[in-house]
Amino acid sequence: MQKKIFSQNPVTKSIWNKKFTRKETGEEIIFSSNNIEFRVAKATGAEALIDLNRYTISEKQQKILEDKEIKEIANKYLKDQFPDINLKEVKFMKIKKIINAIGRFDLKSKKSLEISSQIANYIVIYQRIINGIPVIGPGGKIRIYLSSNGEPIGHSKIWRPLGKPILVKPVLPTNKILRIFIKRHSKDRVESIKVVRLYFGYFAKGRYTKQKNLRPFYIIGYVYGPNSKLVLERYDAYTGKFIEPPKEKSGTLKIYKMKYTLPQVLSR
């Protein structure tokens, strides 16, 4: 796989057939050459390719690309670079834009004098669909990264291979899940709770987590008020059981003394 990446992929064209290095961490195998990095997760086979010199970096933009053009470029990359993917399982989700902004500040008036922004990269995101059912969660996604002029500069893919179905049974309806949600929060000491998201689908975990099967879940997103951040909860679609989120791992961290370099501030 890595040989194909470093000899045929358009992202790596500048270093085709040149030597690359290989190193391992606890979670990944990393292949790199100059500014190009290709990572493969040991637990899932998820991959990520990126040109570090071009990601999040604004380049001189020749023209503003229309969404149709961006999708066409990404679709071609998808078909050319992922022959192992069943295209019937791929659904376009959205295009995200990474924007670089530069501003000037007047010390006397305490006001911004000028703010300019430019598109650094486009990210085209695809979602996996299995027999009409979406795959939700951090997995089951392909992201294709493009420069501001529409050149591929990388991708990421979390796309686990599927075996045969091992269980067929009815899932709980949406209204039943919502009643379970209401009961769970009936004693919350808040004025109101507003459900703003409701997802149903097979839940795929992230790139570093092993997963033996794809099960259907509901994800409910809610807020406590206008200033509350979005909270997501997951419920088993068969039983309605609330799934506790994974606990954060404890560890030790060093404390670093910061070295500050002040940018030049313009004033009039």
Image (cartoon, rainbow, N blue to C red):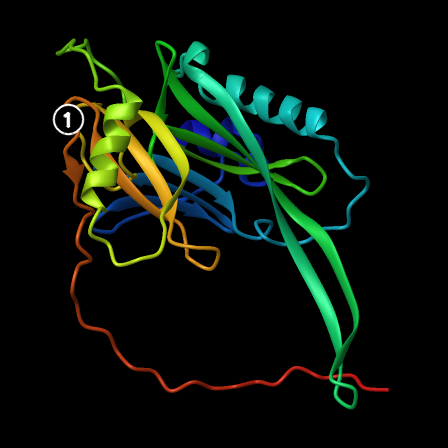
Taking depth in this image into account, of 165 and 182 the one nearest to the observer is: 182
Q: Is residue 42 visible?
A: no
Q: Is residue 147 above or below residue 189?
A: above
Residue in the image at 48% along x and 19% along y: 91
x then y, percent, for residue 27: 23, 47
Find the residue positioned furthest to the bottom: 108
Taking depth in this image into account, of 123 and 106 the one nearest to the observer is: 106
x then y, percent, for residue 78: 52, 22
Hey, what amino acid is under mark 1?
Answer: Lys
Image quarter of residue 242: top left
**Quarter that holds the C terminus:** bottom right
Left or right of 78 in this view: 191: left
Left or right of 204 in this view: 95: right
Q: Is residue 94 visible?
A: yes
Circle 1 Cα neighbour tier, 10 Å, few/some/many (<14 / 14–19 / ≥20):
few
Q: Which residue is mark 1?
A: 212
Taking depth in this image into account, of 136 and 41 the one nearest to the observer is: 136
Left or right of 105 in this view: 93: left
Element on which disc 1 rests: loop
Image quarter of residue 188: bottom left
Find the residue positioned furthest to the right: 268
x then y, percent, for residue 120: 66, 49
Residue in the image at 81% along x and 39% along y: 63
Find the residue positioned furthest to the front: 191
Image quarter of residue 221: top left
Residue in the image at 73% along x and 57% along y: 117
Residue in the image at 61% along x and 85% along y: 262
x then y, percent, for residue 85: 40, 16
